Image (cartoon, helix red, strand yellow):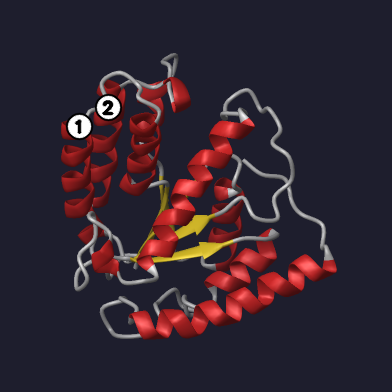
Amino acid sequence: MRIAVSGCAASGKTTTIQHFIQKWPNYTLINSDYRKLIKDKRHSKNTTAKLQGEILDILCSECEPYTPSQNVIFDRCPLDNLVYSMWCYANNVKGFTDKFIEQSILKVKKSMQNLDVIFICTRDLMPPIEDNGIREIDPKYVEETDNIFKAILAKYKKGAETLPFMEKDNSPAIIDIYGQPHERIAQIALYVTEDGGMYGDEHSLLDLDKIAEMEKLIRDQKEALQQEKMPIFGSK
């Protein structure tokens, strides 16, 4: 199965992936080359349309070689790139035109067929952002990009076809996860079997009705966590 872990800065993606690999060691982490591209370049809220386009091409190409029978996990995917481009577009950043976003959407839509599940790490129940010298620490920027991911999640739950970059019958499931590492892994385990497969049909694609049932369990868990005010973990 082809899994991506997405989310805004400081949402615990890397920590989640580390714990995922411990739980499912038969998965291979695919390290992206896009980080080499952004080294010594402006990125995050100071990115450019040219750089975003180059990053998107890399992320799309990295998803292509793998089939549903291969167990791979990606730290970010083309959807992340689109979210950051959408933020730039909404904030009138130079170069992020209607045409640029339309072209990005078409590329992301094509690449979505190369993923089976996207787990989105939200900022819910996360601690204040700490500066590690790498991540974006502007809380307003982080909150706004996190909200874009949440808006995508909300729209997806109404049906994959409601998103312009998704096809109903050939797209990954999009699922939000939150809390401490063991709680996120427990949420993922509602969808991923002990041997790393997907609960559902043999093609590793979830039926939207099944997703709704599982999401109710996760919502109940989230409410319990909030009521107990459990401690939260360090993040990326």
Residue occupied by mark 1:
100
* Residue type at the position of mark 1: Phe
* Residue type at the position of mark 2: Phe
222 in relation to 95, above or below: below
What label does residue 44 carry, if any?
none
81 in relation to 152, above or below: above
Q: Is 231 on the left or on the right of 13, as rendered? A: right
Q: What kind of element bears circle 2?
A: loop
- The residue located at (74%, 45%) in the rendering is 127
Q: Quadrant of residue 48?
A: top left
In front of the other: 89 or 108 = 89
Measuring from the top left, give residue 15's x and y in whole percent.
Answer: 61, 50
Q: Is 180 on the left or on the right of 95, as rendered? A: right
- The residue located at (82%, 57%) in the rendering is 231
**Numbered circles on residues, count:** 2
Badge 1 local density, few (<14 within 10 Å), some, or many (20+)?
some
Q: Quadrant of the C terminus?
A: top right
Measuring from the top left, give residue 28's x and y in whole percent.
Answer: 42, 56
Measuring from the top left, give residue 174's x and y in whole percent.
Answer: 40, 64
